[in-house]
Every structure is written in C-alpha cells, then in structure tokens.
Amino acid sequence: MADLVSYVIRKMLLAIPIILLATLIVFLMLYLTPGDPIIALAPPHASVVELDAIRDKYGLNEPAYVQYGLFLWRLVHGDLGISIGAATRNLDVSDLIVQRLPRTLELMGIGLAMSYSIGIPLGIFSALRHNSLGDRGVMVFTLLAYAMPSFWLGILLMLLFAVELGWLDIAGTTGGFGSIILPAMTLGIGNAALTTRMMRSSMLEVIRQDYITQLRSRGLPEREIIYKHALKNAILPVITVIGLDIGWFIGGSVVVETVFSWPGIGMLITTSISNSDFPVVQGCILVLAFFVIAGNLVADILYAYVDPRVRLG
C-alpha cells in the first residue's frame, strides 16, 4: 500500500505543471481573441479616457505576463472574475458556475451509467458469440454509434422519442427527470460504443487463457466460469478508463447541452460566447479543463491500483 500512496503523491505533483499549462492556454486563448471586452462594460458612446479608466480598473493596460500573474492570483483565491454579459452583468463567475455545475454533473453521471449499462453487456455478448451474426451486428452498432456526431444523434432522438412518439420532453428541465433521458442517451451512446469494443477485446483475451480452459475441464458450468471467474478480470481495463471517459463527456456536454437547452456549464459557455462574456467563458473552460485533468489522474490511480506493476515501474 505504501508504494501506491507514493505513486499517487507523485502523480498529483506531476499534475501541478499540467494545471498551470492549462491556465496559460485558457488565458492566452481569450487574450488573443479579437474583440474588446471593455466595450461591453463601458456606457454607450464612452470616450477614450473612460475606456482607458475601465481598462486600468481591470488591469487590462498591463503587459500580458502581469495580467496572467493577476489571473493566477485571483484563481488561487477562488476569484474567477465578474460577468460582463447583458443578463448576468456584475455577477460573480464562480457563482454562475456553481449554479450550473450540478446540472452538468447530473447529465454526465446518468450518461456514464447508460454508457456502461449498454457497453459492458454488449461487449460480453459479442465476445461470447465471436464471429457470429450477433457479434457482427454489435460491431456495426459500435461503428455507427461512434461515427455519428452528437448533435446529429441528439436531433434524431428528439425526432423519434419526442416528436413522433411523444414519450419524452425536449428542452431544458421542463419534464423533470424525463427531460434528462434524451441528452444523457445522446452523451452516452458514443462512449458505449468504445466501452463495447474494449469489453469485447478484454473478454476475448481472458476466455482464451489457460485457467479458463482448466475450469472448463473440471466441469464447472459455463455461466459460473464466465460471470464468476472471467468477468472480474476482463472488466479491469474498462474500470481503469473511467477517468478518461470524463474527458469524453466534458467535451460532449457542451454540444449536447446546447442541442437540448440543458442548463449546465456547456449551455453557459455557448450563451456567454454569444454575449462576448469573456470572463464567464474563461472560467467555464478552466473548470472543464480541471475536470479533464482530474479524470486522467483518477484513471492513472485506478490503473495502478488494479495492476501493481504500474506503480512499481
């Protein structure tokens, strides 16, 4: 266990420069973006002197490295800035994110649950019927599911389940829990395709091992061999990439939330871009970047936990 703790500490220390690099990329991305955010803060027909005064107030007349240092200082103290959007002007960016983040996490959680509830059984089914018609059908499904853009898949699901069948609601949270099913399904199906392929490959590798042949030679029931002995080894690679899947869902949530008008971080980003609300865009992207880094860190820790060779290497 001591080697695992040492490995975790080492990985957390290595994450610090990655976080700093992420903050630098986010800062430069908006610093180099055309447009002047001060125009949104200034009163109509403001003079050059008034514009310069506002820039001095927010430190925008300082060199880029000074602005970045001030940005880091505020970030360390939990200050992500003040919104300059028409509807949210003078509100703290951190408060806006805290209001929207639970919705995004709810969508990601249900999407992940759907992804694994679809991908793991399909992967097992496909591996146990290798090269059969069912196996080929599953592979066609994974190919189509992975290739479809999420916005297009979301529109198809809306047309089928909301417009034609009338089973589910389309926009926002108007339908309670039912309104999250379509966006979560849209978010989860693409990742379910990857999970299916990984589970299939892992299960095929495990059931070809010598110990599985020995268990069969002892006359154990096939169901017991598969679900008691083979599955617990085959599912380990799938578990270790849960952290990496967070990156998939973070990226997909921006598109899916916009398509379904789901009031999460992704919807907040697109609305803020339309309103030239640079502080909110910067804060949201930074929070999402932290989630991706944390997801990769979790994936590394899980992999080291299930495979001691990783933390000893």
Image: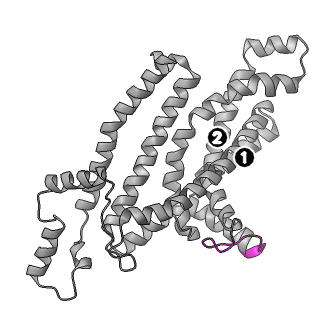
Q: Which residue is under mark 2?
A: 195
Q: Earlier in the sequence, mark 2 or mark 1?
A: 1
252 relative to 16, above or below: below
- Residue 172 magenta-highlighted: yes
Q: Is residue 122 left or right of residue 305?
A: right
On screen, residue 119 versus residue 227, left or right, reads left
Amino acid beneath label 2: Thr
Most foreground residue, 124 or 236: 236
| Magenta span main SS | loop
Label ID, residue 63: none
Residue 210 lies in quadrant: top right
Give x and y (percent) for residue 184.
Answer: 64, 58
Q: Amino acid at mark 1?
A: Ile
Queried whether the magenta region covers residue 246, the answer comes back as no
Residue 68: give x, y in percent of width and height: 20, 53
User: Where does label 1 land, which residue?
Assistant: 118
Front residue of 82/306: it is 82
Q: Is residue 204 visible?
A: no
Which residue occupies the extreme bottom position in the image? 45
**Highlighted magenta segment, given as a residue range:** 163-175
Tell me whether the residue at label 2 lies in contact with that at label 1, contact meaning CB atoms closer than 8 angstroms: yes
Q: Residue at x 37, y 54 (%)?
A: 286
Q: Residue at x 11, y 85 (%)?
A: 47
List the single residue furthest toward the front: 77
Measure the alpha-carbon separation of dots 2 and 1. 8 Å
Q: Is residue 89 above or below residue 268?
A: below
Q: Dot 1, crowdedness within 10 Å: few (<14), some or many (≥20)?
A: some
Q: Quadrant of the C terminus?
A: top left
Q: Is residue 224 left or right of residue 107?
A: right
